[in-house]
Amino acid sequence: MLLAAIFAAMVAVFSAVNPRFFSLAAAANILQDFSPVVLMAAGQTFVIASGGIDLSVGSVLGLAGVAMALVIRTLNDSGFNPAVTIALGLGAAMCVGAFIGLLNGLLIAYARIVPFIATLAMMGAAAGLTIVITGGVEVAGGPREVILLGSSRFLGVFTTPVVVAFLILVIAWASLSRTRFGRWTYAVGSNFFAARAAGIDLNAHIIRIYMLSGVLSALAGAFVYFRLGSGSPLSGRGGELSSIAAAVIGGMSLQGGAGRMTGSIMGALITTSVLSGLILIGVEPNWQQVVIAALIAIAVGVQGIGGMGRERA
Amino acid sequence: MTSPERAEGGRPLYAAEGITKHFNNVVALENVAFSVDAGEVVGLVGDNGAGKSTLVGILSGAYTPDTGRIFLNNREARWSSPHDALKAGIETVYQDSGIAPELTVAANIFLGREILKKGLLGRLGFLDEDDMYSRARKELERVGIAMPGPSRTVSQLSGGQRQAVAIGRAIAWAKKVILLDEPTNHLGARQAADVLGVIRQAGRSGLAVVFISHTLAHVLDVTDRVVVLRLGRVVADQRTSQFTHETLLRAIAGLN
C-alpha cells in the first residue's frame, strides 16, 4: 500500500514537471525497461529471502543475451526456420543462466563460499566471458521476427516480452508465497539451523534457488535481445544494483526470511519509473547508477529504522 | 503425528552403550552408557565441557561415536545424519536455534513435513495452509500449549512461547524420543514453568524425554532420573528422588 502511494506520488511529480511522463508512449517505454529488471528482481527476491545475494544477475543477463544472439545469428545464416532459430536461441540463453546459477549454488552450498563472494566471482567471470566471445562488439544478424516479437504492441503498451514477464511474475509470486519451495526458501533465510534440523536438503535447495535466479536473469537477457534486435556485451551492467534496489525498496530484508514478491515487483516499477522520469525531466543518464544506489541506501535505512522501532516496542 | 511407542523388553527404549568420542586429541566422551525408557524423563547434567552436548549430538545423529553402540527399541541403530534419527522418531529441540522466527507457528510445526493441497496443485507443491493451521491448533492444545494462534509469526511471540512451539513441534512429531537441549535457558520463571509443564506432559504421554539443563531446580522438578557427566564420563545415574540440590551439585563438581 505504501509502495503504491509512493509510486502514485512519483508519477504525479514527474507528470507535473513533464506531462509527457503521463502518456501511453512513456508507459510503454517504462514497461519495456521494467520487464528485464523485474525478472532479475524476482530471482533476487528468492535469493534474498534465503539469506543470500546474487551479484551475478546483470552479467548473466549480458552473457545469456549474447549467447542467444550468437546462436540465432548462426542458425539464421544457415537458413533455419525463424521460429526454430528463436526457440533454440532462447534455449541457449536459459542453459547459460541455469549453468551459472548451478555454479553459484555449488560454490555456496558445497564450497561454503559466502554468497556475496561466490556471486561476485561469477559476476566477473560472466562479464569477462561476454567480452571474450564477442570481442566487445554487438552481435546482430537475426531474423526480422526477433524485432517484431520484441516491439509489436498490444493495446499500445504491451509487447510480447512484457506479457510473458507478467505471467512469469504470477508464477514466481505463487511459488514464493504459496508453495513448499517458497516456504523452504524463507526457512533457510530465517534460520538455517532450524531448516536443517527439520530435515530439509539445504544444499539441493540452495542450488535450486541460484539456478532459478540464473534462469530468470537469462530470460531478462533474452528480453533485452528481443528489444534491441542484437546481443550487446554491455547489456546488464548495473543489473545487480537495480535488482537489489527493487527487492529492498519492496521490503525484502537483506537478513533473509522476510519480504514479498509483490513488494519487489512494485520496487522494480518504482526504480524503472524513477529512471525514466529523470530522463524525461532532463537529468543526464549517467546519474542513473547514483540514483539507484541512493534508493538502496534509503530503503535499507528505512528498514533499519523500522526494525529499531519494532525492537523498542 | 502419531502416538508414541512403548519399549519392547530387554533394553530401555533408547540406549547408548560404551560410547567414546574424541575431537582431535580431546576426549569428549569415554565409555559412556546412557538410556531413557518410554514415559521416562531423564535429566542430563554436567559442568561445561562435561560432554552433554556431544552425547546429545550422538543421540540425535549429528555426531557418529568413535566406538560404542546405540539401540532403539532393542535394535542397533546407526545414524549417518540427524535426518536418519528424525525419521526413526527421535526429535531434538536445540537451544535457541530450532525455530524460524519469520515463519508462522504452524509453518514451524510443519517445517519439512508440509501438508500439500490435493490434486494437481499439490503435485505442483502448493501448501494446504488451512489444514496445517487447524492441525497445528489441535496439536498445541493436545500437548497443553496455550498459543495466541498458529497463524502468528514466531517473532511476535515471547521467548517462552517460542520455546513452547519448538517443544510442541517435537512432541507432535516424535514417535519415540525427545532430546531437549537447555529448553529453559534464558526464560523467565513463569515461562520456564510453562515449558516444564509441557515436558512433564510429554513424559506422561509415553515419550522418552531427555532434558539437558544447567538449572538444577528445573532438573529436580521435572525428571524421574538424573545422569551426571563429568569430564566425559558418567559419574552418577540414579533416581531424582535420591538427589538433593546439594548432592547433585557435588556430583557435578566432582566433590562426592
Image (cartoon, coloured by chain):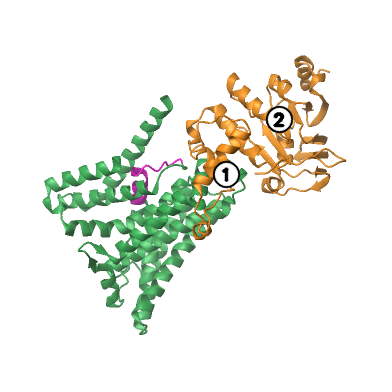
Chain colours: A green, B orange
Residue A216 visible? The answer is yes
Chain letter of mark 2 equals B
> Disc 1 designates what residue?
B110
Q: Position of residue A222 (x, y in %)?
A: 35, 66
Which residue sits at x=68%, y=30%? B201
Q: Which of A31 and B137 is in front in this view?
A: B137
Q: Which image quadrant: the N terminus of chain A?
A: top left
- Residue B199 vertical placement versus A162 (above, below): above
Which residue sits at x=57%, y=55%? A204
> Disc 2 designates what residue?
B211
- Residue B116 vertical placement versus B56 (above, below): below
In the rendered structure, which amino acid carries the disc numbered 1?
Answer: Phe
**Start and end of the magenta stretch?**
A241-255
Determine the secondary structure under disc 1. loop
Looking at marks 1 and 2 on the same chain, the residue that comes earlier in the sequence is marked by 1
Determine the secondary structure under disc 2. strand
Residue B168 lies within the magenta run: no
Q: Which of marks 1 and 2 is in front?
A: 1
Q: Which image quadrant: the C terminus of chain A?
A: top left
Name the residue at the right extreme: B10
Name the residue at the bottom extreme: A79
Mostly what secondary structure, the magenta segment? helix
How crowded pointer 1 is (Cα within 10 Å; few <14, some 14-19, many 20+) is rated as some
How crowded pointer 2 is (Cα within 10 Å; few <14, some 14-19, many 20+) is rated as many
